[in-house]
Amino acid sequence: MPQSAKVFAEKLNNCLDETGAPAQIRERAAILSKMLDISKQQAWSLLEGQQVPEKPLLEKIASEFDVDLHWLSNEKH
């Protein structure tokens, strides 16, 4: 699981890069928590690669950033 969480975090950070989000993790966590209506703590752990979100949150993230769910979750079609 830790490996997939790291891959997810990289992809999530790439999505934030695309939106021009600040590089500082604290600011990114604040942006993500507002965007997804999750706690800053959860946003932080997603960005740091400590957890992979549950499917509903994963779908919300994919929708917010307009990216493919399978790409984001690193699932093979």
Image: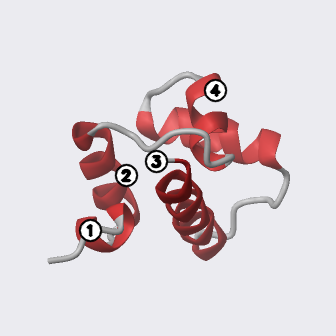
| Secondary structure of residue under mark 1 | loop
What amino acid type is highlighted by mark number 2?
Ile
User: Which is closer to the viewer, label 3 or label 1?
Assistant: 3
Q: Is residue 56 above or below residue 71?
A: above
User: Which is closer to the viewer, label 3 or label 4?
Assistant: 3
Q: Earlier in the sequence, mark 2 or mark 4?
A: 4
Q: Is residue 42 above or below residue 70?
A: above
Residue located at (33% from left, 74% from top): 71
Residue located at (25% from left, 50% from top): 59
Q: Earlier in the sequence, mark 3 or mark 1?
A: 3
What amino acid type is highlighted by mark number 1?
Glu
Residue 34 visible in the current orientation: yes
| Secondary structure of residue under mark 3 | loop
What amino acid type is highlighted by mark number 3?
Met
| Secondary structure of residue under mark 2 | helix
Which residue position is annotated with label 2?
61
Q: Can you give x and y, in whole percent of width and height, for residue 15 in the image?
A: 53, 68
Left or right, 22 with reference to 76: right
Q: Nearer the viewer, residue 6 or 72?
A: 6
Q: Can you give x and y, in whole percent of width and height, for residue 61 in the image?
A: 37, 52
Which residue position is annotated with label 4?
40
Which residue position is annotated with label 1?
75
Left or right, 15 with reference to 63: right
Q: Earlier in the sequence, mark 4 or mark 1?
A: 4
| Secondary structure of residue under mark 4 | helix
